[in-house]
Image: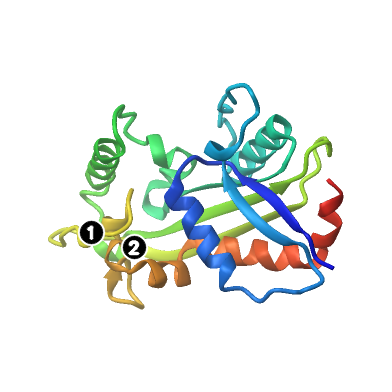
Amino acid sequence: MAVTMKIVLATSNSHKLDEIVAIWRDQPHDEAVASIELVGLDTIDTHRAISEPIEDGQTFEDNAVLKARHYAAATGMVALADDSGLEVDALGGEPGVCSARFARAIGPRPIVDQANNKLLLEKLKDTPAQQRAARFVCAMALVAPGDGDGVLVLVRGTVEGRIIGPGEQRRGENGFGYDPLFFVPELGKTTAELSGQEKNAISHRGQAARLMWRRFQRFGADLTRH
């Protein structure tokens, strides 16, 4: 008989939590495997504040594992963490793991996003549209407490596209970050123009979440022992 297991998602961002919960809800369920309740950090009562880890990894995978280990140890729960960002070929893979702090702006998310987008377009101002190939990347890691350096699952999802070129306008009101600048040729839209359901179907985080779910289904019952 399957039992319910709580997994803590290493974020206080309710939008990210809702996104992954929605994706997992639509996946095939094996009745013999433990069912999952995914919870955010803001629901965890550890009787002390949990410090944020320093994300100093060189890759998205490094940072996802670092965060998952940190919060598994801090909460005593199986922890799921992701690290995601944008890679632009013409910039040698920048902004990469520095995507969220590319322009080093400080303030509310809209201000930071605006600064990051402005810097990205400035760096690409002499690059024609056909040479602006880019991808969103999401690495996702699952770690159980007490396993030392062991990582239960590590997956990666990507979505290919390009950054809008000279003369093209930022498009779309959905999403956040670089979404208004990231054009997906197959869809003829930026990711900011996609509905939540459309974005989950093709996004880097959506792909990683579905891969994570399938891997979990292979051995999820064993995790109930933690």
Asked which quadrant contains residue 194, the reply is: bottom left
* Residue 119 x, y percent position in the rendering: 26, 40
* Residue 159 x, y percent position in the rendering: 46, 65
Numbered label attached to residue 162: 2
Placement of the C terminus among the 4 image quadrants? top right
Q: Nearer the viewer, residue 100 or 12?
A: 12
Residue at the outermost left position:
167
Mark closest to the chain's N terminus, 2 or 1: 2
Q: Nearer the viewer, residue 184 or 67?
A: 67
- Depth check, mark 2 against mark 1: the one in front is 1
Image point 19% across, 58% down: which residue?
Answer: 170
The three-letter code of the residue at mark 2 reads: Arg
- Secondary element under disc 1, as helix, strand or loop, is loop
Asked which quadrant contains residue 163, the reply is: bottom left
Graded by Cα atoms within 10 Å as few (under 14), some (14 to 19) or many (20 or more), the crowding at tag 1 reads some
Image point 78% across, 60% down: which residue?
Answer: 3
Q: Is residue 111 above or below residue 86?
A: above
The three-letter code of the residue at mark 1 reads: Glu
* Residue 116 x, y percent position in the rendering: 29, 40
Q: Is residue 101 visible?
A: yes
* Residue 155 x, y percent position in the rendering: 65, 57
In this figure, which residue is indicated by the disc labeled 1?
173
Q: Is residue 171 left or right of residue 81?
A: left
Asked which quadrant contains residue 2, the reply is: bottom right
Q: Are marks 2 and 1 in contact (CB under 8 Å)?
A: no
Image point 24% across, 47% down: which residue?
Answer: 121
User: Could you tell me how many numbered marks the image carries?
Assistant: 2
Q: Is residue 89 above or below residue 199?
A: above
Numbered label attached to residue 87: none
